[in-house]
Amino acid sequence: MFLGLVKPSDGQALVLGVPIGDVNVRRKIGFLPEDFRFYTWLSASELLKLHGRLCGMTKARLRERVPALLDLVGLTPHREKRLREFSKGMLQRIGLAQALIHEPELVFLDEPTSGLDPMGRRLVRDVIRAQRDRGATVFLNSHLLSEVEITCDQVVFIKEGEVVAGHDLRTHPDGEIRVAARVRNVSPKTVAELAQWSASAQLDGERLTFATRTTAVLPDILRHLVAAGADVFEFTPEKLSLEDLFLKIMGEDRGL
């Protein structure tokens, strides 16, 4: 809908501050679909030149831009190879390059790491970070939550076409800092005294867990445990993973 490929049934949307479908705004957008189809008889260089010309780029600019992008996605040795000879991962990378050919302000990437090996996924993450650093916004759609967690600043969960939650991944998603400690010689009284910092402290064997609203109190808690005679072997803040957060917000769909 943002790209104008599907007509919304209702409502309004703005892209770069302008209603969707505006031609001038669409010139500022790059797009890599999940199920892409490129002209297989073209070489990697020819594909990028074609998309560059479609974006209105000059031949002089393309002579600089095409080699730079091929190098960025690691395809320089294959620049004259026909796309029909490319693996799925190589096609994914040339697709990413074509989405960036005109240095768009906004980039839509649909499952960009699909079919890539670990090195390829890392390359895509580095490219996305580079786009962010130059001031572009990258809109990433993916079911690989580990990739989203590593790459993105903001995440939105959509269920049955509606946004059900959004979080800033630069902060703890639910506002709490969870801590797990491995301790010995901790009395029930010492655990109870942690209530001044945390209402959820629990001791199970040598595993002490609790949650706080800020990391600022962690040194106080650690000093309290040591002063009470506890032997502290580990003291580690734990972050709720995006997968755990997904299950917490969306619920487990037993029908899948």
Image (spheres, helix red, strand yellow):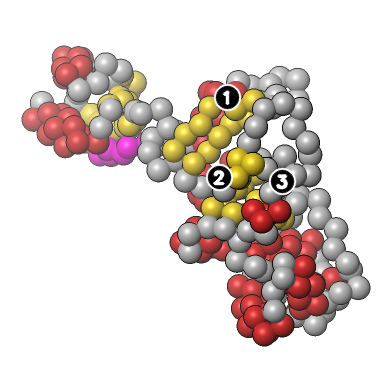
Placement of 220 over or under 160, stated as above or below: below
x%, y% of residue 199? 26, 16
- Amino acid type at mark 3: Gly
Q: Name the residue under label 2.
A: 17
Q: Can residue 70 be seen in this view?
A: no
Residue 21: mark in rendering: 3
Placement of 69 over or under 242, stated as above or below: below
Q: Bounds of the magenta span?
A: 233-238
Give whichever of 198, 158 is nearer the camera: 158
Pick out the residue farthest to the left. Answer: 227
Sequence-first tag of 3 and 1: 3
Q: Name the residue under label 1.
A: 164
Crowding at mark 3 (Cα within 10 Å: few <14, some 14-19, many 20+): some
- Amino acid type at mark 1: Val
Q: Is mark 2 on a helix, strand or loop?
A: loop
Crowding at mark 2 (Cα within 10 Å: few <14, some 14-19, many 20+): few
